[in-house]
Amino acid sequence: MPIDHIKYQQIQEALAPKGVTLVAVSKTKPIADIAALYALGQRDFGENYVQELTEKQAQLPQDIRWHFIGHLQSNKVKYIAPFVHLIHGVDSLKLLKEVNKQAAKHQRVIDVLLQMHIAQEETKFGLDEKELVQLLEAISHEPLPNVRICGLMGMASFSDNTSLVRSELKGLKAIYDQYANRAPVEMTILSMGMSGDYEIAVEEGSTMVRIGSLLFGSRS
Ligand SMILES: *Cc1c(COP(=O)(O)O)cnc(C)c1O
């Protein structure tokens, strides 16, 4: 399916006045689809798989801001460290340390978001509030100069129950408000909202949405 230009314009028109950043999630989609959206002005793209990301990054314009939104394994950080713009799914001190180490090798500071577990489903990755506090505590004792924690990311339940989804997103926003300005971090990004729930997410205070299928069509 070709990309939906009209949908793209509509989404951008809804997000731009609110200052919400659109990350176009291009996982499993061909280079041509990404190039088509790039031609319309889109620069932020998100991918879930390291190998797919590195292959696409090499073939596409260098001013694309690549977001890694999947579950990142420590041993794969090195492949994306030279260029990644923002890593959304950091949920352990071990991974944070590895990002710091690989970023240092490239003499850069890599921006990351801490992933919070907010959905009822057990399968989704992420920290609970207690683990977030522990992690922030740990890095206040052991600063990591080559990573910058810029905010939080979360995924609501994949559900038609909009009141459930809304309450989960509200919960994430409340945690964000509580910790955003608590040393040693200064958070400015709240990444929440996907094709099915981005409108609710924006109402609940999201600053960055990750939208795939609405723009590129459903994935097989
Ligand atoms: C795939 C994915 C998205 C986009 O999902 P859509 O429902 O296609 O918009 C957003 N965030 C994460 C973490 C994803 O894995």
Image (cartoon, rainbow, N blue to C red):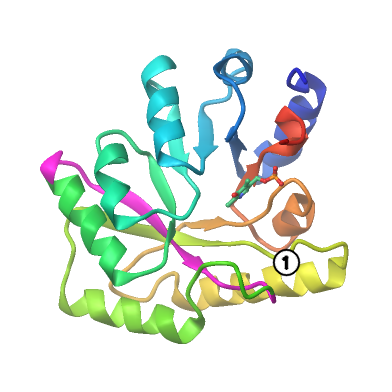
Give the residues drawn in magenta, as a range.
105-120
Quadrant hosting residue 171: bottom right
Q: x, y (%) of residue 208?
A: 58, 49
Specify the quadrant that holds the N terminus.
Answer: top right
The answer to if 167 sits in the magenta stretch is no
- Residue drawn 73% across the image and 36% down it: 220
Q: x, y (%) of residue 30?
A: 59, 21
Q: Is mark 1 within 8 Å of ligand 1?
A: no
Residue where numbered disc 1 is placed: 157
- The image shows residue 149, relative to residue 126, as above or below, that is above
The answer to if 114 sits in the magenta stretch is yes
Q: Secondary structure at mark 1?
A: loop
- Residue drawn 20% across the image and 55% down it: 100
Q: Amino acid at mark 1?
A: Ser
How packed mark 1 is, by other alpha carbons closer than 10 Å (few <14, some 14-19, many 20 or more), is many
Using residue 184 as the reference point, say whether residue 114 is left or right of it.
right
